[in-house]
Image: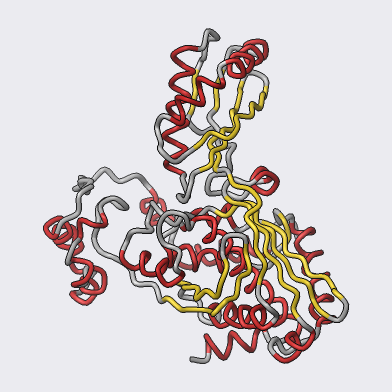
């Protein structure tokens, strides 16, 4: 058979639902008039009510009250800096794990970590990993490197012009750095690395961003740099773009894996054999044996790195603390390692691309601010510690899931905590 069975099955399902003639009409463009939504940037009680009036019979009063609840509507304008066309807030269940003991360069102490998720069993799993790690003395963490990048692209006439363009940028780098840094009181242009592909030049512009995740910061700074290049460069530019889709912004990439786009953190703990047996319900050897198979699966499937489920922990932590949840796409890459240390088990994660901030973005919103306050990591001076907490949290998840699968408990846990409720 040359046609895959799933394609045949899909076609049969479509055919069973639609007859040919009505289906053709259904898929044709429609020219009927419609009333578009006017973009509202400054939320108010009136603007929210106007939007809800449009929904008609598809919603109920209970739907309205769930999103536009009294606490939210007490001050709708406070959400204006974070969203347009505001209609309310979504309440995602938040659980807590901890205390998670972290012995880090920046995060040091016992932390209660808020995790927002709708996936049953997730918080329980991370809590188990946190307990095992804390029972073994805690997780050591270190912020190894930081630098948020933006990669503008410049299109020139040919390869010779591209080379001359790069030469000019190198000569003018001090002036360009001053222009970029003039747009922010916190960001610093750390490096500019040119990449030539014939007549197209990408500039990898890397910034330190203080305690903010800094994506808007680096965009504005890089735009100023590019405008200065366009105004002063003697080499004719055919076009330039603020982002050449090279940086890995909100997508997994090899560049992000190797050089990072946010904060690079490594975290580790040595679990005692007793903790593995009594807390995790398995053995060091069983976890190592499963780890070998999981590592093979990661390589054969083409993972960027090799890990079990960084995305689970990051998404839950990001949502609970006001981070850009879409950055999980690039943050959830890295390496998990497990090795025997005598009778004990050494576990580590290295994550090169954690994009978090303790200021800016959604960190000032009411619920998200509360999440950061639970951690004790809201405000200036806390961004590096938050990144270390993120890596330590992911390590807890790796420990727990590897132990559960090695012991054959993974399915049972999900049945007990999710499906059988």
Q: Position of residue 103 (x, y in %)?
A: 63, 69
Q: Extreme top residue here?
A: 234
Q: Quadrant of residue 324?
A: bottom left
**For residue 320, above or below residue 379:** below
Residue shown at the point (51%, 36%) measured from the top left: 188
- Note whether 47 is above or below 412 in the view shown: above
Percent x, y of residue 178: 47, 25
**Quarter of the image containing the N terminus?**
bottom right
- Left or right: residue 195 versus residue 121 is right
Residue 135, image x and y in percent? Answer: 66, 83
Nearer-the-camera pick, 260 or 8: 260
Q: Is residue 369 left or right of residue 303?
A: left
Q: Is residue 262 above or below residue 341?
A: above
Q: Nearer the viewer, residue 190 or 284?
A: 190
Residue nearest the viewer, comparing 38 with 84: 84
Q: How are the residues colored?
A: secondary structure
x and y, in percent, of residue 122 in the image: 55, 77
Q: Residue at x 18, y 72 (%)?
A: 70
The vertical placement of 16 against 279, above or below, is: above
Q: Residue at x 11, y 58 (%)?
A: 46
Residue at the extreme left of the image, as rendered = 46
């Amino acid at each position: 058979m040359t046609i895959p069975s799933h394609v045949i099955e899909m076609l049969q399902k479509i055919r069973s639902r639609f007859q040919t003639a009505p289906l053709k009409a259904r898929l044709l463009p429609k020219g009927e008039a419609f009333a578009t939504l006017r973009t509202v940037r400054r939320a108010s009680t009136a603007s929210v009510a106007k939007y809800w009036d449009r929904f008609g019979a598809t919603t109920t009063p209970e739907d309205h009250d769930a999103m536009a609840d009294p606490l939210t509507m007490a001050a709708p304008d406070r959400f204006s800096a974070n969203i347009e066309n505001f209609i309310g807030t979504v309440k995602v269940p938040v659980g807590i794990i901890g205390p998670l003991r972290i012995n880090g360069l920046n995060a040091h102490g016992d932390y209660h970590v808020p995790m927002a998720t709708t996936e049953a069993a997730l918080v329980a799993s991370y809590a188990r990993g946190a307990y095992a790690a804390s029972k073994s003395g805690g997780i050591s963490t270190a912020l190894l490197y930081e630098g948020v990048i933006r990669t503008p692209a410049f299109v020139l006439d040919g390869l010779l012009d591209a080379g001359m363009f790069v030469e000019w940028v190198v000569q003018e780098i001090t002036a360009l750095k001053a222009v970029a840094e003039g747009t922010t009181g916190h960001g610093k242009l750390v490096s500019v690395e040119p990449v030539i592909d014939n007549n197209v030049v990408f500039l990898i512009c890397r910034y330190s961003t203080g305690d903010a995740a800094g994506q808007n910061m680096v965009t504005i700074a890089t735009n100023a740099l590019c405008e200065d290049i366009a105004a002063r460069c003697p080499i004719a530019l055919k076009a330039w773009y603020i982002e050449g889709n090279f940086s890995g912004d909100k997508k997994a990439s090899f560049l992000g894996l190797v050089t990072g786009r946010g904060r690079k953190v490594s975290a580790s703990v040595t679990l005692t054999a007793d903790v593995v047996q009594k807390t995790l319900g398995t053995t060091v050897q069983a976890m190592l044996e499963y780890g070998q198979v999981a590592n093979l699966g990661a390589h054969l499937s083409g993972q960027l790195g090799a890990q079990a489920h960084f995305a689970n922990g990051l998404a839950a932590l990001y949502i609970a603390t006001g981070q850009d949840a879409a950055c999980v796409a690039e943050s959830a890459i890295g390496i998990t390692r497990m090795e025997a240390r005598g009778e004990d088990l050494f576990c580590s994660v290295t994550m090169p691309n954690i994009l978090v901030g303790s200021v800016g973005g959604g960190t000032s919103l009411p619920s998200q601010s509360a999440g950061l306050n639970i951690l004790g990591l809201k405000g200036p001076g806390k961004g590096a510690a938050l990144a270390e907490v993120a890596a330590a949290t992911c390590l807890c998840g790796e420990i727990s899931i590897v132990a559960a699968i090695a012991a054959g408990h993974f399915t049972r846990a999900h049945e007990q905590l999710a499906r059988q409720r």
